[in-house]
Image (cartoon, rainbow, N blue to C red):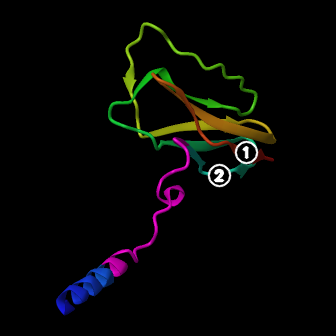
Amino acid sequence: MKIVKEAIVMVFIIVSFACKDNATNPSINQPTRALSLRANATSGTSPCNIILTGTFNAYTDTTTMHTPDMFVIGGPGLTVIPYWLSGYPPIPAKRTYIDTLYFPYAGSFSVHMLLQTMTQDIYSDTITFTIN
């Protein structure tokens, strides 16, 4: 009986130490959006170029995209109407998309990225730029 009690105590100790790892919080370990957007700057003096980097966090090797696959929406004097070209074969998704926006004049601009997968449109978070 003593051996059984010692074995139970030993198992309890092992389990309690094994569970002392940091808890995993999905919002910390995984991106909160399928598409995240970053910029090399959020302010500048016109005229200026700002480089945007979109990271497709939901990327898989089998994800396919319409043609064109990506749009940057918002910016100085731009009206973007997303479209896709029918009759073109799907193209493979990329993990990273990079685009440069040119800001010829001052203002405040909100920009987001759109990816057009074959199954759904995926929107990034929005970045606001202040151009002086």
Query: Which residue shows up at 75% across the image and 43% down it?
Result: 46
Q: How many marks?
A: 2
Residue type of the residue flagged with mark 2 = Ala
Q: Nearer the viewer, residue 123 or 39?
A: 123
> Eyeballing the image, is 75 above or below 29?
above
Mark in the foreground, 2 or 1: 1
Which label's residue is closer to the chain start, 2 or 1?
A: 2
Instruction: Give the residues drawn in magenta, as a range.
Output: 15-35
In the image, residue 118 lies at what x, y percent? 45, 22
Residue type of the residue flagged with mark 1 = Thr
Query: Which residue shows up at 39% across the image and 19% down it?
Result: 90
What residue did someone put label 2 on? 41
What residue did someone put label 1 on? 128
Kindly give the residue lying farthest to the top in the view shown: 87
Q: Which of 132 and 78 is in front in this view?
A: 78
> Eyeballing the image, is 121 above or below 56?
above
- Residue 3: assigned label: none
Q: In this view, does 91 lie to the left or right of 45?
A: left
Query: Which residue shows up at 23% across the image and 89% down it?
Result: 6
Residue 27 among magenta residues: yes
Residue 42 among magenta residues: no
Query: Which residue shows up at 32% across the image and 35% down it?
Result: 61
Q: How far apart are the two marked residues, 2 and 1, measured between alpha carbons?
A: 10 Å
Label 2: element kind:
loop
